[in-house]
Image (cartoon, coloured by chain):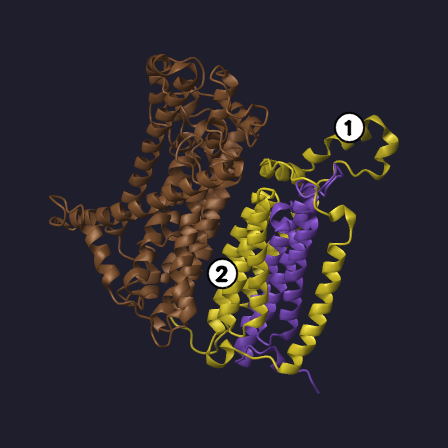
Chain colours: A yellow, B purple, C brown
């Protein structure tokens, strides 16, 4: 018997947790428990990112997604969680339709996922060497692509290749756009959630 | 015990992503609670993110074929940031809805129905 | 450590990894548990002294050493209550979520150069993120208790932690910018040498950032004066009103655990980590890099060429760990001092402190530190000899995560090249 692949074992663990709690989010009708299951599911997904060698994305997932967005969500849940709204049940007919549509979609996606040869698992596990992802990502944002150095060099040597240049495509522009977008969202959310103006004598 | 001894490929990640995506889609379709729908959206975005990270990873490929590389991780980052923005606005809308209608059931948002 | 079992004792890689994982988990769990015991005792003593009393004096001898243990025994024997209105499953799960997230921070926390459970390249972010997750336990406890006091506590906690994550993140980024890496081991190693190399003395901006970080860290682990989630004068006991016995004490272990974690993070990011104010370990030769000197030479003579430098390095790191733990304990003591000195803030004051003071100050400090680094203006640490930071970082990146594949399994004794010592330094 081959020895157990530690990487695979951890993957299966995290994947099982992520999938099981994702399904639990759908199945449960109590909104606070839904939020809790979602937290666990997304936390396990962060584990999957670490396993895939994407340290920075994993840490970001934990910090922004789980630590920021979901806390916000739970906050919203608690603000609106009052007696009748905590558990709102879905009708049985809707469940049946949702189950049929969902399982057919799942079947389609899964059969696609396992059919393409290029996506098959490698014949033997590659040694998982931790890479320094954060500085590479930072460079990528500024247009300095560590992972595309050969391509860029080839384009520099041969100008005909550079026509549809793919080598040093950076992400500075999207980064700026998303920063401004975040600012707009911040102001918009504050505007939407502001208290209604009360008509009446102003307090001194 | 084949799964335990065999290395993990992109397909496995895609399967996880597919489960999360479908769970999110079903969640969006069946929940009546506005915040439940929001959670469905988060699940869908995460399912997509799992795929991006899987395609960008160097460990899951068999050959020297170029992976998505940093592109995948950067897009995953953007998705995370956008999800945060989306959640903030959606939450503000949900709270406004709750203030105006005294309920969080989206089926009751039928003011524009003739 | 897995490498040690694998290469030096000749175990199978799977077994070596599993063994190393078990040992490291046990060690870290001990740090958290014993740390909590000591800190609770310390808290009682500190609060006693500040309020002009003695604190515990009887249990376990003169200073009441065993007071916490006695408390623990009392808590274990208490009845484990679950209120009728509570959401049973979440109520029971909440303390464990809190504790797990606080404990997970130790996974990436280096205790000395290279002594870290899981070397993550983005350790700084990881720790901040994971400590921030502790809030879920508190929120769920607040909700699941089915009590209004608890719910209020949970809500306050949620609002507070989400807001304080912003200035905390900004403060943490300042040393990261100076170091140019998010790896805590590299950041710590960069501050070797005299105390002027510590990042807190890098420039005036980092000096101020350090204090902003302390404020935000106190708030994010919700200690007084920011402990609104458990404000006993208004909310009975806040989120843990309905908890009793062991579950309640797990909340406390989590709180003290994350206090220690953020203090240790402060020590590594700003106060030189495991490096003392004077480079004692390298003066004594307790290092495994370079020519053995002083005690290191003696050890080389005693244990042979292969093991001498390694033993010396081990001793040096042990000293470093003592150093780090001492600094982190100082941070924890400072938090206690603040707790028993300042009155609790109101919730609007807490949010004002965060949004109107901490965040703008942190942002200005961040920009200032960036400009200072770009401008290359000398400050305290440029007038004494120190290692080039870039060099430390690059050498670290080169050796980082490279498996020791090229070396034979169970290396022969003669293989005492510098390469092996560097590899030992890079792994653990």
Residue C141, disc: none
Left/right of residue C180 with respect to residue C104 in the rendered view: right
In-front residue for pair C71/B35: C71
Residue at the front extreme of this rendering: A1
Secondary element at tag 1: helix
Q: Earlier in the sequence, mark 2 or mark 1?
A: 2
**In the picture, which quadrant includes the C terminus of chain C?**
top left
Q: How far across and how far down the image is residue A34, in percent?
A: 53, 68
Q: Which residue is mark 2?
A: A71
Residue at left offset 41%, top offset 72%: C87
Give the image location of residue C347, x and y in percent: 37, 62
Residue C75 showing in the rendered view:
yes
Q: Residue at x 78, y 48 (%)?
A: A117
Quadrant assignment, res A203? bottom left
The number of discs equals 2
Q: Position of residue C147 (x, y in %)?
A: 35, 73
* Relative horizontal placement of residue C192, taking residue A42 as reference (left or right): left
Q: Quadrant of the N terminus of chain C?
A: top left
**Who's the residue at 85% across and 28% down the image?**
A158
Q: Nearer the viewer, residue C375 or A80?
A: A80
Tell which subunit mark 1 falls on.
A
In the picture shown, does residue C155 fall above or below A94?
above
The Cα–Cα distance between marks 2 and 1, rounded to whole angstroms, is: 46 Å
Q: What is the secondary structure assignment of the residue under circle 2?
A: helix
Tell me, yes or no, if residue A188 can be seen here.
no
The residue tagged 1 is A153
């Amino acid at each position: 018997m081959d020895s157990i692949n530690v990487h695979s074992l951890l993957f299966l663990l995290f994947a099982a947790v992520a999938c099981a709690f994702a399904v639990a989010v759908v199945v449960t009708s109590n909104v606070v428990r839904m939020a809790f299951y979602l937290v666990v599911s997304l936390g396990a997904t962060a584990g999957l990112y670490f396993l895939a060698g994407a340290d920075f994305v994993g840490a970001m997932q934990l910090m922004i997604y789980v630590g920021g967005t979901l806390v916000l969500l739970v906050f919203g849940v608690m603000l609106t969680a009052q007696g009748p709204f905590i558990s709102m049940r879905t009708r049985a007919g809707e469940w049946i339709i949702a189950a049929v549509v969902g399982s057919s979609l799942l079947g389609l996606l899964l059969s696609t996922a396992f059919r393409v040869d290029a996506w098959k698992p490698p014949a033997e596990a590659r040694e998982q060497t931790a890479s320094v992802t954060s500085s590479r990502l930072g460079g990528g944002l500024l247009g300095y692509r560590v992972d595309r150095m050969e391509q860029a060099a080839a384009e520099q040597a041969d100008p005909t290749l550079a026509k549809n240049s793919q080598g040093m495509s950076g992400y500075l522009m999207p980064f700026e756009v998303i920063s401004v977008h975040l600012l707009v969202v911040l102001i918009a959310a504050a505007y939407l959630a502001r208290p209604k103006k009360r008509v009446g004598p102003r307090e001194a | 015990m084949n799964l335990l001894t065999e290395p993990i490929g992109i397909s496995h990640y895609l399967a996880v992503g597919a489960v999360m995506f479908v769970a999110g889609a079903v969640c969006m379709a069946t929940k009546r609670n506005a915040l439940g729908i929001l959670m469905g959206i988060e699940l869908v975005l995460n399912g997509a993110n799992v795929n991006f990270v899987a395609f960008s990873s160097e460990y899951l490929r068999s050959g020297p074929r170029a992976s998505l590389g940093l592109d995948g991780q950067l897009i995953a980052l953007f998705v995370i940031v956008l999800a945060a923005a989306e959640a903030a606005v959606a939450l503000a809308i949900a709270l406004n809805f709750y203030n105006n209608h005294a309920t969080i059931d989206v089926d009751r948002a039928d003011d524009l129905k003739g | 450590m897995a490498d040690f079992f694998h290469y030096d004792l000749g175990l199978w890689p799977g077994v070596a990894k599993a063994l190393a994982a078990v040992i490291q988990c046990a060690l870290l769990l001990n740090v958290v548990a014993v740390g909590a015991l000591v800190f609770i005792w310390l808290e009682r003593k500190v609060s006693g002294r500040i309020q002009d009393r003695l604190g515990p004096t009887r249990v376990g001898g003169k200073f009441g050493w065993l007071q916490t243990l006695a408390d623990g025994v009392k808590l274990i024997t208490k009845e484990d209550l679950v209120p009728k209105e509570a959401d049973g499953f979440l109520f029971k799960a909440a303390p464990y979520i809190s504790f797990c997230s606080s404990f997970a921070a130790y996974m990436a926390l280096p205790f000395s150069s290279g002594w870290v459970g899981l070397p993550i390249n983005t350790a700084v972010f990881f720790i901040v993120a994971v400590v921030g997750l502790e809030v879920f336990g508190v929120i769920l406890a607040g909700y699941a208790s089915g009590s209004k006091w608890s719910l209020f506590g949970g809500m306050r906690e949620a609002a507070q932690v989400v807001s304080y994550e912003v200035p905390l993140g900004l403060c943490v980024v300042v040393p990261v910018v100076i170091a140019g890496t998010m790896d805590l081991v590299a950041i710590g190693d960069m501050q070797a040498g005299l105390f002027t190399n510590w990042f807190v003395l890098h420039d005036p901006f980092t000096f101020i950032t350090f204090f902003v970080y302390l404020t935000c860290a106190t708030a994010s682990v919700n200690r007084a004066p920011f402990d609104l989630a458990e404000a006993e004068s208004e909310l009975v006991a806040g989120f843990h009103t309905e908890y009793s016995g062991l579950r309640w004490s797990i909340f406390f272990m989590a709180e003290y655990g994350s206090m220690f974690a953020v203090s240790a993070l402060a020590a590594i990011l700003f106060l030189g980590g495991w490096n003392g104010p004077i480079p004692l370990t390298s003066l004594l030769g307790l290092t495994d890099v370079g020519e053995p000197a002083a005690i290191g030479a003696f050890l080389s003579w005693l244990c042979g060429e292969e093991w001498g430098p390694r033993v010396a390095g081990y001793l040096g790191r042990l000293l470093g760990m003592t150093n780090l733990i001492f600094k982190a304990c100082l941070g924890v003591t400072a938090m206690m001092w603040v707790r028993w000195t300042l009155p609790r803030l109101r919730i609007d004051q807490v949010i004002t402190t965060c949004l109107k003071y901490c965040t703008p100050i942190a942002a200005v400090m961040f920009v200032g530190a960036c400009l200072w680094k770009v401008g290359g203006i000398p400050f305290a640490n440029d007038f004494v000899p120190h290692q080039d930071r870039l060099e430390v970082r690059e050498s670290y990146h080169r050796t980082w995560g490279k498996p020791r594949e090229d070396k034979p399994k169970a290396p022969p004794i003669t293989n005492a090249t510098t390469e092996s010592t560097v590899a030992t330094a890079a792994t653990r």
